[in-house]
Image: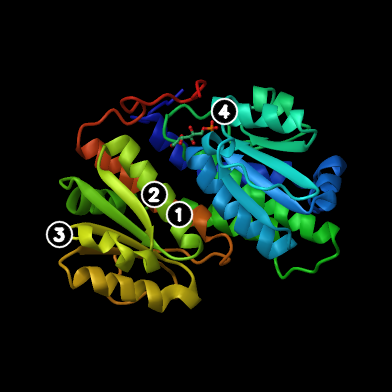
Amino acid sequence: EKGTYPHYMLKEIDEQPFVIRNIIQQYQNEDGNLKLEESIRQAMKDTDRIYIVACGTSYHAGLVGKQFIEKMAGIPVEVHIASEFCYNMPLLSKKPLFIFISQSGETADSRAVLVQVKKMGYKALTLTNVPGSTLSREADYTLPLYAGPEIAVASTKAYIAQLAVLAILAVDTARAQGLSLDFEPLKELGIVANAIETLCDNKDEMKKIADEFLSTHHNAFFLGRGIDFYVCLEGALKLKEISYIQAEGFAGGELKHGPIALIEKDTPVVALSTQKQLDLNIRGNVKEVVARGANPCIISMEGMENEGDRFTIPAVHEMLTPLVSVVPMQLISYYAALHRGCDVDKPRNLAKSVTVE
Ligand code: F6R
């Protein structure tokens, strides 16, 4: 039930710190070590390349998951949109492992790929919020997301749950290979939970940004580099699906190769900067769009802030910033949709679970 909340989406955004804390508990042994089924550990050990398959927001989680797994565990990962997989089928490695990411576990596009993968005799692992769902039953292994039921059509808490579980999987795989990591995932996720809580206590600022900066416009840019780019794709999807503002996420470096032609006076540009080594470059991109009249909204991370930044997220481990930086994007989208009188929980033309291909 949504209780005193006007919308499920807002309730589900607010639940995110609890979701992270729940995941920490569920994936922890009595001795404080990570708890993962031995068969999953073995499957991760046995593979020479991982193929992540998903749609929409879950696909965006997969892009971040690729970074986690490649950087921490050193296994190559490809991320594929489920509906394209059959036509644009990659050449498979000798020992592929498929990871399906799906909040509902019922998405038809992903199910079609799983059926094909099973026919070819490969192993599959499903990350889902609904254990017992089709994608969970038909895969060899399941990692539950423990986010609790997600009712709003726009996915929020399931996305951060997907990221948290992917981070845990990546660390566990690295450890199983004897790699030493300068990363204590459960401790770092605890810091993430606190950071999200701080952001959820700061909604007024997000509402202001949405009201003043976005609500009256027809289009918006989201710019990021590296892992921030993936969060920008998710931020743009969130905004477009619930507020109907045309929003696109771009890699900062791609601007000059086309998208910058769209910048006009007052075009809203959200720029995300949470990675120290990319900070100068993304700020350079902001200068380029401002020179063409854009109205920038820079979201940076504590310790990296510059004068003129609109908002700063609390500092967390540089690998885990997407779990935190997506929260202002979710809230800005929510308030922009509210301002425009949209049906936040049930946006037009969309269904919570897409069971047709
Ligand atoms: C966006 C959204 C969709 C879903 C997509 C996949 O907010 O919710 O893009 O992420 O339809 O759904 P699942 O994760 O259930 O497979």
Q: Residue at x 56, y 25 (%)?
A: 108
In space, the residues marked 2 and 3 are separated at their CA atoms by: 19 Å
Placement of 320 over or under 217, stated as above or below:
below
Q: Secondary structure at mark 3?
A: loop
Tell me where residue 12 appears, x and y as whole percent: 46, 36
Q: Which mark is residue 266?
A: 3
> Which mark sits nearer the N-terminus, 1 or 4?
4
Q: Are marks 4 and 3 in contact (CB under 8 Å)?
A: no
Instruction: Let me know if residue 17 appears in the view.
Output: no
Check disc 2 and report its element: helix, strand or loop.
helix
Q: Position of residue 26 (x, y in %)?
A: 72, 41
329 or 224, nearer to the observer: 224
> What is the three-letter code of the residue carrying label 3?
Asp
For this orientation, the residue located farthest to the left is 265
- Mark 4, secondary structure of its residue: loop
Do residues under tags 1 and 2 come within 8 Å of each other at their CB atoms? yes
Quarter of the image for residue 64 reads: bottom right
Q: Quadrant of residue 117?
A: top right
Residue kind at label 4, given as amino acid type: Ser
Question: Which residue is denoted by mark 1 in the rendering?
Answer: 231
Reading the chain from its start, which is encountered first: label 2 or label 3?
Answer: 2
For the residue carrying disc 1, how many other residues have a C-alpha within 10 Å: few (<14), some (14-19), or many (20+)?
Answer: many
Camera sees residue 276: yes
Structural distance between the alpha carbons of marks 4 and 2? 20 Å
Question: Looking at the picture, which amino acid does disc 1 mark?
Answer: Val
Identify the residue at horizontal 18%, vertical 52% (top origin): 212
Q: Earlier in the sequence, mark 1 or mark 3?
A: 1
Observer-nearest of 17 and 83: 83
